[in-house]
Image (spheres, grey):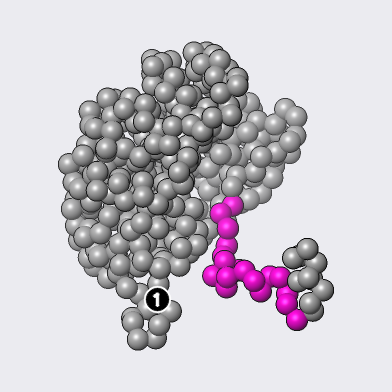
Amino acid sequence: MCATKLSSNKSIRVGQLVRPLVRALHPYVPGEQPKIKGLIKLNTNENPYPPSPHVLRTVKAAVDGRLRLYPNPTAERLREKLANLHHCRSENIIVGNGSDELLALAVRAFAEPQSKSKIQPPKLAKATVQYFTPSYSLYPVLAEAHGAATNAVPLKSDFSLPGLTELTRLRHWDFNAALTLVTTPNAPSGRGYAITELEALCLAQRGIVVLDEAYVDFADANALPLALKHPHVLVARTFSKAYSLCFQRVGYFVGHPELIGALHKIRDSYNVNGLGQIAAEATLTDLAYYRANFRRIIATRAGLDRELTKLRFQVLPSQTNFILVRPPQFPAEVWLNKLRTNKILVRWFRAPEVRDYLRITTGTQAEAEALVRAVKKILEG
Ligand SMILES: *Cc1c(COP(=O)(O)O)cnc(C)c1O
């Protein structure tokens, strides 16, 4: 009824009822989910291997009349198992509907929305969400949705982290930013960062630092100890990429109980679905299966690097389950389309820092071989 009344009133355009901030927002653009049969999907860094048989059996066995019940509100058992794994307490952990949810909660818990008032300075440090470019393209969307100021600072041209002296010299790096988000290993470049480097950066920041380790299982080192050592550092992890559970949406943060407690206060009451909790718990009892897959993916990544390098691609070193490559002969966007014609989907970003590159998920050995065949075919015209 309400809708009819509004639309009959010509003076009210329904779009005007949306907050101006939301109207002006540029939403996150997820990787394409094509419906084309036989297409090899190397565009969203999903794990090419399925969850372990034990995880699949456990999830299936949980699908019964219990679906009518609310799940555990704090994912208590999962947090205990994660605490065990990471040698901390369950108070150090919050589980989210994917780590994306927790990143959004962190923005809301730690960064003030910008004041509209003319009296206050427009860019309060307390309102600033800071990140490097390129990195996870969701960060600016989350900050803008909250009305926080953003401070995007470029990585070096080889996608390494600027050191502290460089950051100081850069002037516009903000050591007082309310929240600094660091994708490590970096996406979309795949580059890994040394723990000493990350620790130096964390120690120089006076606000909160989130180290987003979505791809860390494919890397040589991880920064989790920093979250247990420094009270203002949080580490973000996810079951999506390494543990083949994108569909179930389970991620978590590790950090100081005060910060974790603040995030618990503002999350939805039942933020993590029950089957997701069950799947993640089962995953933790079967880590050997996943570690074998990490080794396979890393081996495939190394082979892909060798083959594409031979074909005159510039392949950046990767500590993730994808590679960033600068292709020869045609612009990257043309490669994207030519590969698509050959039924291989990769990712291309329009952003200036990466527009000359393609991001390619490693895939299975067979998928990587199909990619190399398609590349050869394209190069031969
Ligand atoms: C995929 C990804 C995430 C989000 O993972 P979910 O747990 O699926 O929400 C977070 N950060 C980075 C850098 C990612 O690539």
| 375 sits to left or right of 246 | right
SS at circle 1 = loop
| 154 sits to left or right of 363 | left
Q: Using the image, determine if residue 263 lies above or below residue 215.
A: below
Residue located at (23% from left, 32% from top): 88
Residue located at (35% from left, 62% from top): 111
Q: Using the image, determine if residue 17 lies above or below residue 69.
A: below
x, y (%) of residue 360?
54, 38
| 153 sits to left or right of 270 | left
| Residue 179 visible in rendering | yes
Quarter placement of the C terminus: top right
Residue located at (30% from left, 62% from top): 178
58 or 360: nearer the viewer: 58
Residue 49 sits in quarter: top right
359 or 315: nearer the viewer: 359
x, y (%) of residue 368?
57, 27
Residue 117 lies in the magenta stretch: no
Report the number of discs: 1
Residue 13 lies in the magenta stretch: yes
Which residue is disc 1 drawn over?
115
Highlighted range, magenta: 11-29
Q: Is mark 1 within 8 Å of ligand 1?
A: no
Residue located at (79% from left, 79% from top): 10
125 or 358: nearer the viewer: 125
x, y (%) of residue 198?
25, 47
